[in-house]
């Protein structure tokens, strides 16, 4: 039992969670309440840091961000659908075991019949008795053949059912790693693949780059034209990522209007090329409101690119890419900034503001 499961502690943490929701002006939805209750409990430092950053960045009130963060920390992939498939799989395995057991019993019975016939033959028989034995053996043989055909059919059906269930489980697992709105990898899938890519980079001494992209002025666009149109914008941008990110590279929705790409075995200059391709593709698209066919203009993205440094943790890599993204935002948006040029861009931006 966790200490916070005790009634008095739970009541205290409930009050703290509700206070935090009020403090940050966050709607007290079930997802938000569970996130901030866990924050108040203080057991998961990573969750606490994520919520602190979200509060500073203004993302803590975003419903999409909350759903994704909740999925990352509280959804273990054991959906009702997956549980149902697992139960069906268990039942089918029991059925298959019964079929195999029946096959063994049938073979045993037939073997005993053959042994009996052999003994009778050894003892000598009259013609009439021999005829009866042969007839009995024929009956037993036909019964065994019939039973084996039935068992073979049952075996085939069970194996087919188990294979279908296995495919269902694979499909459920795949869906659990996708962002439902954009079809890109979700945050859970991104975390897994980045950890794998970093391990490969360390073990094989190969380069690894990432870049983070953010839709420029998305909140203003969303507030002006509504969430349905905003969702269409997210899908459009996601399609630009899908078109330009191939092979072993991974594009994911990082949260809200942010996207992130993992590029294993890729040096920084080549990562910048891919980022520029996506930025250009997004800028070339025209946004049309489906309900009115109204042209809403175009959108742009800002991108920050960084290359993995041997020995660093992945969180630091993401933070460096994020710093480059903010440098791109400060210097006018609709551009790609890498860590090679971030300092120069930041200095130019500061000079321009002065």
Image: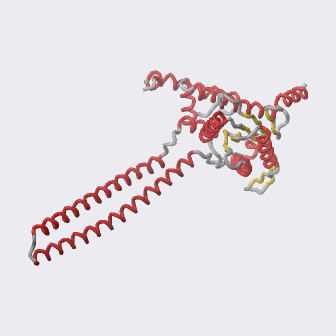
Q: Please report the residue visible at 8 percent of the width from the left and 76 percent of the height from the top.
A: 126
Q: Nearer the viewer, residue 110 or 20?
A: 110
User: In which quadrant of the rendered view does residue 312 lie?
Assistant: top right
How many dots with numbers?
A: 0
Q: Position of residue 104 (x, y in %)?
A: 28, 58
The C terminus sits in image quarter:
top right
Q: On screen, 276 above or below 137?
A: above
Q: In screen coordinates, is 287 left or right of 164?
A: right
Q: Position of residue 46 (x, y in %)?
A: 60, 28
User: In which quadrant of the rendered view does residue 97 lie?
Assistant: bottom left
Q: Nearer the viewer, residue 47 or 125?
A: 125
Q: Please report the residue visible at 48 percent of the width from the left and 49 percent of the height from the top.
A: 81
Q: Is residue 101 visible?
A: yes
Q: Nearer the viewer, residue 203 or 350?
A: 203
Q: Is residue 259 visible?
A: no
Q: Position of residue 249 (x, y in %)?
A: 68, 45
Q: Position of residue 94 (x, y in %)?
A: 34, 52
Q: In screen coordinates, is 67 left or right of 110?
A: right
The N terminus sits in image quarter:
top left
How is colour applied across the structure in the image?
Answer: secondary structure
Q: Please report the residue visible at 25 percent of the width from the left and 69 percent of the height from the top.
A: 143
């Amino acid at each position: 039992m966790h200490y916070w499961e005790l009634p008095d502690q739970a009541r205290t943490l409930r009050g703290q969670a509700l206070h935090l929701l009020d403090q940050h002006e966050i709607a007290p939805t079930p997802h938000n309440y569970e996130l901030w209750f866990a924050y108040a409990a203080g057991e998961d430092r990573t969750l606490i840091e994520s919520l602190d950053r979200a509060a500073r960045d203004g993302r803590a009130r975003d419903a999409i961000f909350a759903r994704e963060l909740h999925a990352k920390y509280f959804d273990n992939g054991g959906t009702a659908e997956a549980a149902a498939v697992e139960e069906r799989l268990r039942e089918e395995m029991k059925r298959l075991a019964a079929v195999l057991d029946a096959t063994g019993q049938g073979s045993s019975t037939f073997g005993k019949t053959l042994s009996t016939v052999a003994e009778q033959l050894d003892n000598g028989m009259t013609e009439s008795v021999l005829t009866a034995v042969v007839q009995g053996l024929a009956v037993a043989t036909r019964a065994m053949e019939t039973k084996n055909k039935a068992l073979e059919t049952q075996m085939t059906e069970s194996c087919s059912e188990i294979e279908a269930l296995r495919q269902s489980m694979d499909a459920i697992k795949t869906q659990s790693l996708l962002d439902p709105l954009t079809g890109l990898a979700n945050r859970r899938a991104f975390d897994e693949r980045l950890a794998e890519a970093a391990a490969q980079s360390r073990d094989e001494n190969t380069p690894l780059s990432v870049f983070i992209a953010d839709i420029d002025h998305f909140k203003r666009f969303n507030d002006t034209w509504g969430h349905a149109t905003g969702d269409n914008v997210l899908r459009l941008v996601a399609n630009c990522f899908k078109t330009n990110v191939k092979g072993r590279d991974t594009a994911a929705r990082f949260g809200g209007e942010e996207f992130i790409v993992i590029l294993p075995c890729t040096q920084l200059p080549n990562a910048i090329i891919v980022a520029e391709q996506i930025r250009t593709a997004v800028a070339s698209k025209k946004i049309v409101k489906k309900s009115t066919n109204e042209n809403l203009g175009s959108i742009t993205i800002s991108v920050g690119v960084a290359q993995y440094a041997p020995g660093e943790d992945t969180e630091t890599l993401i933070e460096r890419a994020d710093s480059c993204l903010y440098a791109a935002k400060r210097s006018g948006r609709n551009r790609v900034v890498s860590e090679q040029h971030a300092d120069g861009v930041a200095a130019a931006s500061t000079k321009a503001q002065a």
